[in-house]
């Protein structure tokens, strides 16, 4: 069953391919524009800077003619910096703690691109856990190579009109450290190293061909990623747990209509922060996926949600612990 997150999930059938079912390395494909996904994207609080940069970077990677047009309009010619952009690998790394919005942003920013770039559809391909294989020699390398070849083949068939592609592809690799772990680790298995090599070759192939594809890797273990993968990233986005002001905004959005006063919102936001016994605050997922729904279930079916009850439940709530970035012995 596909993962449900932020209440958003749209399923589409995967285009036919030549791989056997047991070697199918993609989950269902999401297509944009999609109004529901755009609402989820717009509701991601505290990520305005990241969202703005991500959509602009993605737009110029998918549509290479945009920078040419910008340069001619503002500098009367195509300046050398534009060519520099065209040589970058189409890779973004989303790194940070659990529950900070990485996956949700990766799964929905395609809606913002298609909304910005009118008449451009976007397809989101998720790499399946099957790509990790079962440990057989050569299996992981083959599966990763198959995945990149499928993406390359599909992207090469996209129609280009006056330098503008009719559609684009987002290739999403969640928990990327499982596939792109540093080859410097002494205990790393040969098969895992071969898988990283295949991953790098795939990135380089898509980069050289200049296809309308964006690769997004999400990881909780940024320090574990292979340096060669990190060097290829066009941009690295760091995600953190929400600040007090960001927590207040999430509370305002999600608890609207129950009559909370400004001072009460302030109090709830404080309870969601770090304490003398806990050095970390709540994550976005703690609030949206666990705590806020629990308020409804607690009050249903006979009572209203009250400030006093919110405080009581917040004081007893255990937020997700930060992800421990433990390396193998190197």
Image: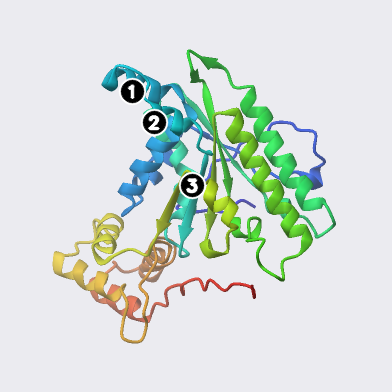
Residue 81 tag number: 2
Relative side of 208 to 313, left or right: right
Residue shown at 48%/17% (left/top)?
Answer: 163
Graded by Cα atoms within 10 Å as few (under 14), some (14 to 19) or many (20 or more), the crowding at tag 3 reads many
* Callout in the foreground (1, 3): 1
Above or below for 95 versus 153: below
Tell me which numbered mark, 3 or 2, is placed earlier along the sequence.
Answer: 2
Question: How far apart, in angstroms, are the residues tagged by discs 3 and 2?
Answer: 27 Å
* Callout in the foreground (3, 2): 2
* Callout in the foreground (1, 2): 2
Q: Nearer the viewer, residue 253 or 30?
A: 30
Is mark 1 in CB contact (under 8 Å) with mark 2?
yes
- Please tell me in which quadrant of the rendered image residue 249 appears: bottom left
Q: Is residue 57 visible?
A: yes
Above or below for 35 versus 69: below
Q: Position of residue 203 (x, y in %)?
A: 62, 41
The residue where tag 3 is placed is 106
| Secondary structure beneath label 2 | helix
Relative side of 23 to 65, left or right: right
The residue where tag 1 is placed is 71
Labels in figure, total: 3
């Amino acid at each position: 069953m596909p993962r449900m997150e932020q209440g958003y999930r749209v399923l589409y059938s995967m285009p036919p391919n030549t791989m056997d079912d047991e070697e199918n390395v993609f989950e269902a494909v999401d297509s944009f524009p999609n109004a529901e996904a755009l609402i989820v994207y717009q509701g991601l609080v505290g990520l305005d800077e990241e969202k703005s940069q991500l959509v602009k970077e993605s737009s110029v990677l998918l549509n290479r003619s945009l920078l040419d047009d910008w340069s001619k309009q503002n500098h009367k010619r195509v300046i050398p910096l534009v060519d520099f952009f065209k040589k970058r690998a189409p890779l973004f790394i989303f790194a940070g703690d659990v529950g900070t919005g990485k996956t949700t942003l990766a799964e929905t920013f395609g809606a913002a691109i298609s909304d910005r770039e009118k008449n451009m559809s976007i397809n989101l391909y998720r790499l399946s856990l099957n790509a990790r294989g079962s440990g057989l020699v050569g299996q992981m390398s083959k599966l990763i190579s198959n995945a990149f070849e499928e993406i390359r083949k599909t992207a090469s068939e996209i129609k280009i009109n006056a330098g503008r592609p009719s559609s684009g592809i987002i290739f999403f690799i969640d928990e990327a450290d499982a596939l792109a772990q540093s080859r410097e680790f002494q205990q790393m298995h040969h098969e895992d190293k071969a898988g990283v090599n295949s991953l790098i070759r795939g990135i380089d192939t898509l980069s050289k061909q200049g296809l309308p594809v964006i690769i997004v890797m999400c990881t909780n273990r940024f320090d574990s990623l292979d340096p060669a993968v990190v060097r290829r990233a066009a941009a690295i986005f760091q995600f953190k747990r929400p600040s007090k002001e960001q927590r207040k905004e999430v509370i305002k959005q999600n608890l609207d209509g129950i009559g909370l006063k400004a001072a009460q919102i302030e109090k709830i936001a404080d309870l969601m922060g770090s304490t003398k016994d806990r050095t970390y605050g709540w994550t976005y997922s703690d609030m949206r996926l666990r705590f806020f729904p629990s308020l409804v279930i607690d009050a249903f079916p006979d009572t209203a949600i009250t400030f006093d009850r919110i405080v009581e439940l917040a004081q007893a709530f255990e937020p997700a612990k930060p992800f421990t970035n433990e390396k193998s012995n190197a």
